[in-house]
Image (cartoon, rainbow, N blue to C red):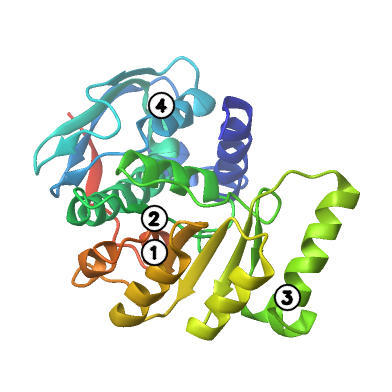
Amino acid sequence: MNDNELRSFIINALAEDTGEGDHSSLASIPASATGRARLLVKENGIISGLRAAREVFSVTDPSLAVALLMNDGTRVKYGDIALTVEGKVQPILRAERLVLNIMQRMSGIATATALYTEKVRDTGARITDTRKTTPGMRALEKEAVRTGGGVNHRMGLYDMIMLKDNHVDYAGGISAAIIRTKEYLRIKGLDLKIEVEARNIREVREILETGGADRIMLDNFNIPDTREAVTLIAGKCETESSGGITLDNVRDYALCGVDYISIGALTHHIKSLDMSLKAY
């Protein structure tokens, strides 16, 4: 997410939260009141979202003085202070919840990603995300995956071809889907990689026989079938394991020799990292 996109996101998020005004702060805090606050980490993990947090304060009130005390990707523990902010109290309070919403979620994603990447660190497999993201926050959530040591899959429907089960079924089969896709890319003059989902070994064979795939996704394959598929593919294209991957079995899949392991839970079923913004 570039700076302009981030500011646009923040403006919309603040408008959603503030509405006609933060009446709690307007009612109880004089407009001239100043103070300071610090972001306290209350759980061990990987911090992420500091760039976005600084921008939230800046958009809310450019006069706020923000000091980032660490970098994204830093391992944190209970009691660490991630940043401080000083200035008028009303805008600090107006920015508080959005800062926490962004940083808690991004840090939770980065922390979970780091756990998975550590499991496969010496295998050659790379942990990647999916499109199972929060609407409007995809770029930030994918940034958090990178912070945790993972890599990003496609950003959206526009930057990579991915022929999944429904595409294949509606198209009339794997070969028809791939052939039509290659012709579409030729006509449109597009240079996009093609990934094709396989549901079993037979479909892996059909993808290879048809040709044209840059990556084959092995969807919900068990360990023995994954090994067989990787042997069959033999480096002709990239391989990706997906579906049913957990911290308990991710290493077993990595040891099968796949290039990527995609995990929707990194952004879809995530536990936010606990933190709070406190006056001091």
Element carrying mark 4: helix
Q: Amino acid at mark 2?
A: Asp
Q: Amino acid at mark 3?
A: Ser
Q: Earlier in the sequence, mark 4 or mark 3?
A: 4
Spatial CA distance of label 4 from label 3 is 50 Å
Q: Position of residue 194 (x, y in %)?
A: 65, 57
Q: Position of residue 272 (x, y in %)?
A: 30, 56
Q: Which residue is mark 1?
A: 263
Closer to us: 192 or 100: 192
Q: Name, please, the residue furthest toward the right.
A: 187
Closer to us: 162 or 87: 162
Q: Residues within 10 Å of mark 3 (few under 14, many from 20)?
A: some
Q: Which residue is mark 3?
A: 175
Q: Amino acid at mark 4?
A: Arg
In this rendering, the label closer to the viewer, 3 or 2:
3
Q: Position of residue 132 (x, y in %)?
A: 51, 64
Q: Which residue is mark 2?
A: 259
Q: Which mark is residue 205?
A: none
